[in-house]
Image: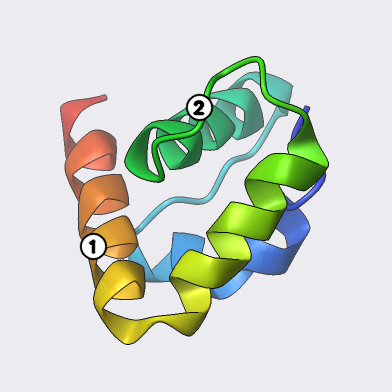
Amino acid sequence: MSCYLRHMKAILEDAGIEPQNKEERKAADLAIRQATNQKKDEKCNIVWKEVKNWIQDEKKKTRLINSLKEWNSQK
């Protein structure tokens, strides 16, 4: 399970995602990994390191949010 989702509440809220249970958190984690081009079996700390880079870059942050919005609308 993702070690970083708790740090992404604002991003997830911007994307309209509010995971309520383990399955929803896992699905959100996989969507984030896909959006940031991370392998689904990559260790959490490696993924978080890359996601932090995305969050600090406004263009990448916007791409991440838009990707998550699109994913959320297709669920």
- The amino acid on which the numbered mark 2 sits, given as a three-letter code, is Leu
Where is 58 relative to 75, above or below? below
CA gap between label 1 and label 2 equals 16 Å
Q: Quadrant of the C terminus?
A: top left
- The amino acid on which the numbered mark 1 sits, given as a three-letter code, is Arg
Task: Please tell me the numbered disc located at residue 1.
Answer: none
- The residue drawn where x is 56% and y is 57% is 51
Along the horizontal axis of the image, is 28 left or right of 4? left
Question: How far across and how far down the image is residue 20, in percent?
Answer: 64, 38
Question: How far across and how far down the image is residue 31, in percent?
Answer: 42, 33
Question: How far across and how far down the image is residue 15, in percent?
Answer: 33, 60
Q: Report which quarter residue 53 is drawn in.
A: bottom right
Question: How far across and how far down the image is residue 25, in percent?
Answer: 63, 33
Question: Element type at marker 1?
Answer: helix
Give the residue at mark 2.
30
- The residue drawn where x is 80% and y is 45% is 45
Give the residue at mark 1.
63
Which of marks 2 and 1 precedes in the sequence?
2
- The residue drawn where x is 41% and y is 45% is 36
- The residue drawn where x is 75% and y is 59% is 6
In front of the other: 2 or 60:
60
Along the horizontal axis of the image, is 51 left or right of 7? left
Query: What colour scheme was applied to this rendering of the protein?
Result: rainbow
Number of other residues with Cα within 10 Å of mark 2, as a class: few under 14, some 14 to 19, many 20 or more: some
Q: Quadrant of the N terminus?
A: top right
Along the horizontal axis of the image, is 63 left or right of 29? left
Number of other residues with Cα within 10 Å of mark 1, as a class: few under 14, some 14 to 19, many 20 or more: some
Along the horizontal axis of the image, is 61 left or right of 33? left
Where is 20 relative to 74, above or below? below
In front of the other: 68 or 48:
48
Where is 62 relative to 8, above or below? below
In front of the other: 60 or 16:
60
